[in-house]
Image: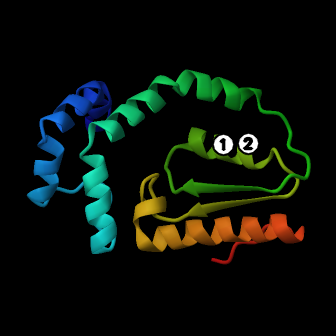
Amino acid sequence: DSGGAITRMRWSFPWLARLGLFRYYFERGGEIDFERLPARAHSETAAFWSTPRFHESVLDEFGRFDEIFLQARQLGPLGDLPLAVVTADTKSAAWRRLQNELAGLSTQQTHVTIPGASHSSLVFDPEHAQHTTAVIVAMIEAVRGSAPPQPSQ
């Protein structure tokens, strides 16, 4: 699959960025995940995604997945600590189960699955980002006012 190929090639991305290939790609109209952003946000995102620093940070994150997942598996119950889980719409039953388990860590939780969303569209698609933002705002309000988290949808 192409996603697996990209993951295997990702180690070369900082070097490709140093050569200006990502900048060239975006200047020629290439898109990845953020084509629906407003013009200024789009150009700022393309500029950042064209830097070696961006790709090095992604590699660093990928290199820490084992540690991140180990920490997540060791996470215990959160009691009544407010918790919001936003889930991209996925066909993966295993991922849905994990997201449900995560939401179940708190007795004061909200779990929202955004229909048609992907991992990146939760941030980059205006409609999906609006839902994501509503969940975050509801959580902030719940923490400040001790109200149970109830995102508007």
User: Residue at horizontal 50%, vertical 51%?
Assistant: 90
Question: Horizontal and vertical percent for residue 10?
Answer: 29, 30
**2 vs 1, front mark:** 2
Which quarter shows the C terminus?
A: bottom right
Please state if 105 lies on the left or on the right of 8 as rendered.
right
Tell me the tag on residue 67: none
Number of marks: 2
Tell me the tag on residue 101: 2
Asked whether 42 or 103 is in front, the reply is 42
Q: Identify whether 130 is placed above or below 19.
A: below
| Badge 1 element | helix
Question: Horizontal and vertical percent for residue 77?
Answer: 86, 39
User: Residue at horizontal 31%, vertical 50%?
Assistant: 48
Q: Identify whether 70 is placed above or below 118.
A: above
User: Residue at horizontal 73%, vertical 42%?
Assistant: 101
Which residue is the extreme one toward the bottom?
Answer: 152
Name which quarter of the figure residue 95 lies in.
top right
Name which quarter of the figure residue 135 lies in.
bottom right
User: Residue at horizontal 55%, vertical 64%?
Assistant: 114
Crowdedness of circle 2 by 10 Å Cα count: few (<14), some, many (20+)? few
Question: Horizontal and vertical percent for residue 34?
Answer: 32, 61
Please state if 131 lies on the left or on the right of 106 as rendered.
left
Alpha carbon distance from label 2 to label 1: 6 Å
**Residue bearing mark 1:** 97
| Badge 2 element | helix
Tell me whether the residue at label 2 lies in contact with that at label 1, contact meaning CB atoms closer than 8 angstroms.
yes
Three-letter code for the amino acid on which mark 1 is drawn: Arg
